[in-house]
Image (spheres, grey):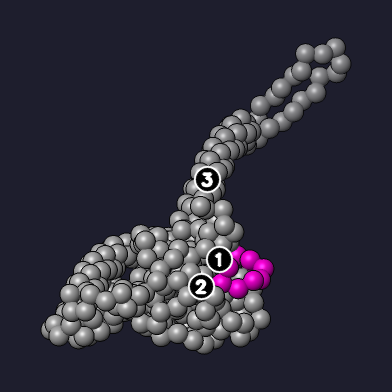
Amino acid sequence: MTQWTPPSQRPVMTLSIPRAWLPLLALAAALAILFPATLLQRNRALQAELDRATEDLTATALRERDLEDGMVRQHRQLQEAQAQLETMTHQIDAIELQLDGVDFLAGQLRESMGLPPGSGTWDPAANAGQGGPGASAPATDRLAQAHLRLLTGMIEFQALQQKAAQDRAAASGSAAEAAAAPSYSRPANWPARGEVTSSFGWRVFRGTPNYHTGVDIGLPFGTPVQVTGDGMVVGAGWQPSYGWSVLVDHGQGYSSLYAHLSQTLAKVGDRVGLGDAVGLSGSSGNSTGPHLHYEIWKDGLVIDPRPLMDGSID
């Protein structure tokens, strides 16, 4: 047993500690020193892990925001691409409608002149079961090919017209033959009077940006639609986007298109004069309600019809 005498003037106190307890006391003292240090070290480790986790969460949030921004950009680009595709599809529809009329007229001229049938600029049967300029081809390629076929067809048709006129003149030389030639004039009027509900150019259609290739005129169902200049009907029938529609060639590179009709009143080959009714307004094809979609083409490209409609182009 160990005796401990505190330095004091007071009476001596004796504290007896069993010798066997000394290791336990030493262990307790060591634990009293080491335990706080261990806790401090553990706390620092946990804080470091927390800091790393916070950094990871911040980095993850930044990556998610970047992904969201990327998805928004991709969605916007997809919308723009869809709008461009729809615009090109409209243009292809109009070109193929005109090609159909040109082929028909060229065939009529060949037959009247005793010439063999041509191959045609647009033959649906020729593309059956093949890749060609179909839905699998890029729309830009299909549009370029449609323009090329239209140009080729118009050149052939104009050459046939010139030869037919020369043949008629050589056969008779009469003024009556010259008077029978079709009259052409630039489209320069309103096809029907009404409120313009959608102008030419970019717009939002059914929630999607869309390039509008003409003007929409709100009209009651069945309103007569008048041709805006002298010319010849080169297309009349159904198109997936335009519905019932009529296409008129006015010469000098001008054509006018009247779409979403409820009924066509002209057929391919008809000669029409300013103010003649070529159809009745409706809502056929890709349409949200009764109206007239009116387009003007110049040298194979759509142009804004309003300046010609309003007489602001000389």
Camera-near label (2 vs 3) is 2
Along the viewing direction, whichever of 269 and 292 lies nearer the viewer: 269
Crowd tier of the residue under label 2, counting other residues whose Cα lies within 10 Å: few below 14, some 14–19, many 20 or above: some
* Disc 1 + disc 3, Cβ < 8 Å: no
Of the numbered discs 1 and 2, the one sitting upstream in the chain is 1
CA distance for labels 1 and 3: 58 Å
- Highlighted magenta segment, given as a residue range: 189-198
- Under mark 3, the amino acid is Leu
- Under mark 2, the amino acid is Leu
Give the structural element (helix, strand or loop) at label 3.
helix
Along the viewing direction, whichever of 313 and 152 lies nearer the viewer: 313
| Left or right relative to 32: residue 87 | left
Residue furthest out toward the left: 116
Q: Is residue 202 magenta?
A: no
What residue appears at the point 80 percent right and 23 percent down from the top-left corner? 13
Res 62 label = 3
Image location of residue 313, percent across then percent down: 52, 53
Residue furthest out toward the front: 174
Give the structural element (helix, strand or loop) at label 2.
loop
Q: Quadrant of residue 141?
A: bottom left
Q: Is residue 191 magenta?
A: yes
Judge whether residue 124 can be spotted in this image: no
Look at mark 1 in the image and give the residue it sits on: 189
What residue appears at the point 52 percent right and 63 percent down from the top-left corner? 188
Give the structural element (helix, strand or loop) at label 1.
loop
Q: Quadrant of residue 183?
A: bottom left
- Under mark 1, the amino acid is Asn
CA distance for labels 2 and 3: 64 Å
* Disc 1 + disc 2, Cβ < 8 Å: yes
Camera-near label (1 vs 2) is 2
Res 274 label = 2
